[in-house]
Image (cartoon, rainbow, N blue to C red):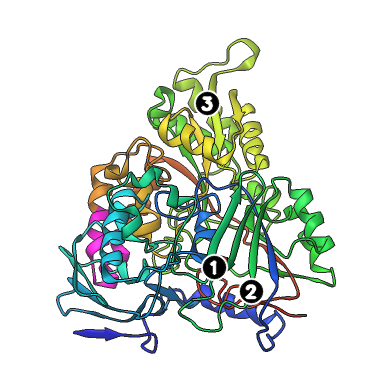
Amino acid sequence: MKRWTYTRAMPHFFAAWAVAAAFAFATLPATSQPRPGGTLTWLINPVPSSIVPLTTTAGGNAEIGPKIVEGLLTYDYDLKPKPLLATAWSLSRDGLQYTFELRKGVKWHDGRDFTSADVAFSILTLKQVHPRGRGTFANVVDVKTPDAHTAIIVLSKPSPFLLTALASTESPIVPKHLYEGTDIASSKYNSAPVGTGPFVFKEWVQGSHIILERNPNYWDKLKPYLDRVVVRFVLDAASRAAALESGTADLANGTGGIPLSDVERFKKLAGIEIDTRISPYLGSHQQIYFNLDTPALQKREVRKAIAQAIDVNAFAKTVWYGYGTPSASPIGKGISRYHDASIQPYPFNPKEAEAALEAAGFKRGAGGTRLKLRVLYNPFQERRAADFVRQSLGRIGIDAAVESYDFATYVNKTYTERAFDITLESLTNLFDPTVGVQRVFWSKNFKVGLPFSNAPHYVNPEVDRLLEAAAVETDEAKRRQLFTEFQQIVHRDIPSIELGANPAITVLAKKVRNYAPTGEHIRGSFADLYLQP
């Protein structure tokens, strides 16, 4: 048996990100001795549909949830695994069994004992209901529980990425005694969670805030240091900026943060820090997806024309203020070991795009319109991004009507009603393409009503073959080649226009210390966070 614990190094998969993270982190002031007490006010946008990242993983629940529920492992910025609910782990020589020794003395927030039965139930449930679960746990055939503190994940085929998929934000362990025999998707515990983590859910006032309170019985004694975390939902970016600048809020990040136009000014404020570290676990990425069920968009020449009408470099400069990292491949530059740098955006050429639309039978009609399309956008992308697309398509005669929705409605419109023609999405690459990228382009992951899955309804048997082969390939060179071929085919087929890594901007008061010590960054637990007087 191979045996790993937190003292044993895993392969250095994310060297480039690790160097960047180390450099950025070095610019932050050194932490002092942790001090107990205090309340953290944390701004989040958009409002999530749940708190536990179980049946959906966006809208803030993948950030809030890990403060309450925990995974088997956590990770450093090199994505080396470290103990959480599991204290040690090993892999059988044939690569088909992961054995986890579980932490003893852990209690659920309702006082019940945490056991291996909870692990088995959670892993098998995640396989069924998690947006990425069918891919992540595709090869899981059983979870054995020989005793209360041992869980053995049994595989039909090797899963080289699985050991990195067990963070709280990705694979939360939930209480079997509260979920078993219920409709998981509608469970009240998704929004009023009971976990094992450092904070206990107190209340959720819709449209206003969520309150988490210190878990006095947390297994990691003395932690957490905070007494309370108040999550406030402030939808207006200018209002968030004012709250942070005035000191009435302590922390905000991403779409819940400040306008990108304010970043340079905030860098000069005395009581504020700007953190630009990229989470290697999250793998920020944004893209534009075509609905391939829309008749006009079933024509590749139309999709190519649209790609040629959108200047992605101008998009990065104007919408992202130059803070993002453009990438034309579905596997972005952050996953450097698999990213195909030879793939470039289709050249910006509106004239050629217009000619292609003419040839495809879409001639300008009354008012110069060739075609009308519905454009949606995930609130994790800015309205300005959708407007950029609308203006770009307008120049070639496509009337792109932008529809704005709150997060929950957007998810329903896109993945249940499929009432869109083009959508601007924010599906992160995550820590491995099999987990973060395959979900979009694997035909078997198309399911009406499943959030953040195969939104385009893209079907290509060769792509399926490549993705399925890469998911079980343990030879790194062969796996890299499989992903290279996959990227090239997708780029030719154009089910999407890849934008790349969106800006990662976290704004925090200088008194906030040690808020993101793990590779999950802000999606970690906050157990180590403290406020410096």
Please report whichever mark, 3 or 1, sits nearer to the chain's N-terminal start: 1
Seen at 66% across and 81% down, the residue is 36
- Circle 2: is it few (<14), some (14-19), or many (20+) Cα within 10 Å? many
Q: Using the image as rendered, state which of residue 398 and residue 416 is in the foreground.
A: 416
Q: Is residue 502 above or below residue 12?
A: above
Residue 406 horizontal/vertical position (percent): 59, 38
Residue 361 on image: x %, y %:
45, 17
Residue 253, given in percent of the width and then of the height, sits at: 65, 60
Task: Compare residues 527 and 295 and report the one nearer the observer.
Answer: 527
Asked if marks 2 and 3 touch (Cβ < 8 Å), the reply is: no
Is residue 307 among the parts visible in the rendering?
no
Q: Which mark is residue 226?
A: 2
Does the stretch in magenta take in 477?
A: yes
Cβ–Cβ under 8 Å for marks 2 and 1: yes
Q: Which residue is mark 3?
A: 355
Q: Of marks 2 and 3, which one's residue comes earlier in the chain?
A: 2
Q: Are marks 3 and 1 in contact (CB under 8 Å)?
A: no
Magenta stretch, residue numbers:
466-483
